[in-house]
Image: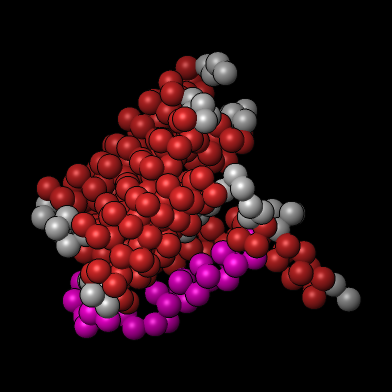
Amino acid sequence: MELSLDVIALLALVAVVAGFIDAIAGGGGLIVLPALLAAGVPPVAALATNKIQGSFGTASATWSFWRAGRIDFALLRWPIAATLIGACLGAMTVTLIDTTWLLVALPLLLTAVALYFLFGPKASDEESHRRLSVLAYAPIAGLIGFYDGFFGPGNGSFFALSLVTLLGMGLTRATAHTKALNFTSNFVSVIVLAIGGHVLWGLGAAMAVGQIIGGHLGSHAAMRFGPRLIRPLLVVISLAIVLKLLSEPANPLRAAITGWLTP
């Protein structure tokens, strides 16, 4: 499809904002997907284009964190391998089964994540006791990767929460390692969707430039302000995804809640 230059420029600007948010707390798709749909991009192409531009943002954030010495790739070798396999399986599975149940489970899970960061032990940059070995954590990373390839919203929150609670990472360090795992799952999803011919490459390239800029700025903001910025954004983004999912008329959880509240 063809889009005017001013629409492409506006979408690239949207990608800058999304990349900034993604680098800190994830959830940039909440901004990008509605913008793509509003510009007239078909839903499947919007999902595919969002993935490719998002992968550049996570790549930029990963690079910035790594250059600053915040990512230990040797530590992540097994979680990254598991995430890659999980995302590949998730992207292939999404075409085979009904995803309606996710619309019920996901708002509940993300609400739990938000409540943990809001009311649970105060997340800081101090390392805590590691509850699992890195090898034992790998299947958890694989499951989150599967979810990202399968559906996606909120996966950054799940990675961050699991790294803090299971591997005992400080919040800024967990955020840095989350970007590396996010990039892995995004990259695999892009390959699967590209094979299906759903990516709008020209638009994706323009938005990728915006994502790189936003990811670079967001990663530096996260390193500068640490938990003071990351913690509230994780809460806000998690709850924003919940509200977005519940705003969909077809969401069965919304229908159930409406039924309970209706006399």
Give the side of residue 125 with respect to residue 109, left or right. left
Name the spot of residue 225 as percent of width and height, x first. 23, 61
Residue drawn at (80%, 74%), measured in percent from left and top? 261
Locate residue 14: give its quadrant.
top left
Question: Relative to the observer, which residue lies in front, 232 or 58?
Answer: 58
Residue drawn at (60%, 67%), measured in percent from left and top? 105
The C terminus, quarter of image: bottom right
Whether residue 41 appears in magenta in the rendering, the answer is: no
Locate residue 135: give its quadrant.
bottom left
Name the spot of residue 114 as percent of width and height, x first. 46, 71
Residue drawn at (47%, 17%), measured in percent from left and top? 5
Question: Relative to the observer, which residue lies in front, 10 or 50?
Answer: 50
Q: In this view, does 203 lie above or below 227?
A: above
Name the spot of residue 64 as percent of width and height, x first. 19, 46
Question: Relative to the observer, which residue lies in front, 5 or 182?
Answer: 182
The residue furthest right is 263
Whether residue 128 appears in magenta in the rendering, the answer is: yes
Q: Is residue 213 above or below residue 173?
A: above
Q: In this view, does 132 lie above or below 241?
A: below
The magenta stretch spans which residues?
A: 103-131
Residue drawn at (67%, 57%), measured in percent from left and top? 100
What scheme was used to colour the molecule?
A: secondary structure
The N terminus, quarter of image: top right
